[in-house]
Amino acid sequence: MNTATQLLRTLRRTTPRLARTLNTRSGPSAPSMLIRQPWKTRTAALLTAGGSATILRAAWAPTSKRAMCASAAASSVSDSIAVSAKPAAHISDIDILLYQYKICPFCNKIKAFLDFYGLKYRTVEVNPLSKDEIKNQLDTTYRKVPICVINGETVCDSSVILQTLQDLLHDRGVLLPSHHTTPRLLAKEQEEQEETSSSTSSVERVWTEWVDKDLAVLLFPNITRNFPESWQAFAYINDVDTFSTTQKMLNRVLGPVAMWAAQGKIKKKYNIEDERAAMFKAVYKWADAVEASGDKFQGGRLPSLADVCVFGCLRSISGLDTHTEVVNDPRVKEWYNAMAIVVGPTTEE
């Protein structure tokens, strides 16, 4: 078999895997020629442009490099994880509608949990300026996101939403033991163990609270450090199909200005002097916990609830400069890539 034939067969075999990985990591808008072009067309173009050397360069382009790293992570992760993919994927009697901002870390914490378990859900993108979707569609005075309508019941605040989902999954027998962090489940453990204060679930509860009170609040001042980054953060508005042209224009112009202006207030409220230093201090605290586990995840062989929540928060700013700095840090990269594989593709409908 000649070299050209071998290259063709190798490229044909690996392209679907790379495409799936890129879709998982970057979403439907991933700027990858690997996804958009048929393999034969791409192969012909690469061979014409310079043979095997060109193929190797193209395969090692930045986007493809990330995909290959994710594929390598997948191999090692799959060998060490004994949890079935999407443990709640068979459940169809839980109707979930999530009101969100796409870049909200608290919203994405909930979405990561739903994606990990395989629960199908729908989302409503809320207009950050008017919040009309909440005012017109929900009977609540609560005006923050996330708000989740679960089987017709409106549940507000990400921590309460998460507890509600945990209890529902526990009742159906699919909630992982390390994810028993709600007051109800902790009380049940106390009856069974008498030493709940030192139980794994209690430790996980501390970490999930840390995600809300420390990590998540640091993301806003970091993605709005200056006007260009604030502008970058609000780019998602252009892709919201439910917004009119006028709504998109107003949010695209006024949103970054408002976010940039609010950055100082947020820093003062949480006593943050250097937002980048504070963020990496928090991220390294998490990296220490992962390393202390002696395995891929903070939860050990299986992702803990904290693993899922931290991943969701960081995934919320995917594509932004802050996200690039964090996930490419050597202390975070392997864990993040492993979590991207375990959480898998979104179950949003």
Image (spheres, grey):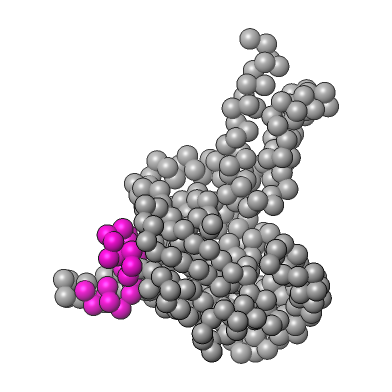
Splitting the image into 4 quarters, where does residue 178 fall? bottom left
Q: Quadrant of the C terminus?
A: bottom right
* Magenta-tinted stretch: 167-188
- Do we see residue 5 in this rendering? yes
Residue that lies at the very extreme toward the top in this rendered image: 1
- The residue most toward the right is 49
Determine whether, in the image, residue 202 is placed left or right of residue 6: left
Q: Is residue 35 magenta?
A: no
Name the residue at 50% across, 55% down. 347
Foreground of the two, 278 or 9: 9
Q: Position of residue 109 (x, y in %)?
A: 50, 68
Is residue 109 among the parts visible in the rendering?
A: no
In percent of width and height, residue 78 lies at 42, 42
Is 174 in the magenta?
Answer: yes
Tell me if residue 151 comes above or below residue 60 in the rendering: below
> Front-most of 42 and 118?
118
- Location of the N terminus (image quadrant): top right
Q: Residue at x 52, y 70 (%)?
A: 98
Q: Nearer the viewer, residue 341 or 114?
A: 114
Residue 24, given in percent of the width and then of the height, sits at 57, 49
Q: Quadrant of residue 273?
A: bottom right
Q: Going 68% across and 67% down the picture, which residue do you hit?
A: 242
Q: Nearer the viewer, residue 316 or 203?
A: 316
- 102, above or below 5, in the image: below
Picture coordinates of residue 115, whole percent (x, y):
48, 57
Q: Is residue 128 left or right of residue 77?
A: right
Q: Is residue 155 above or below residue 167?
A: below
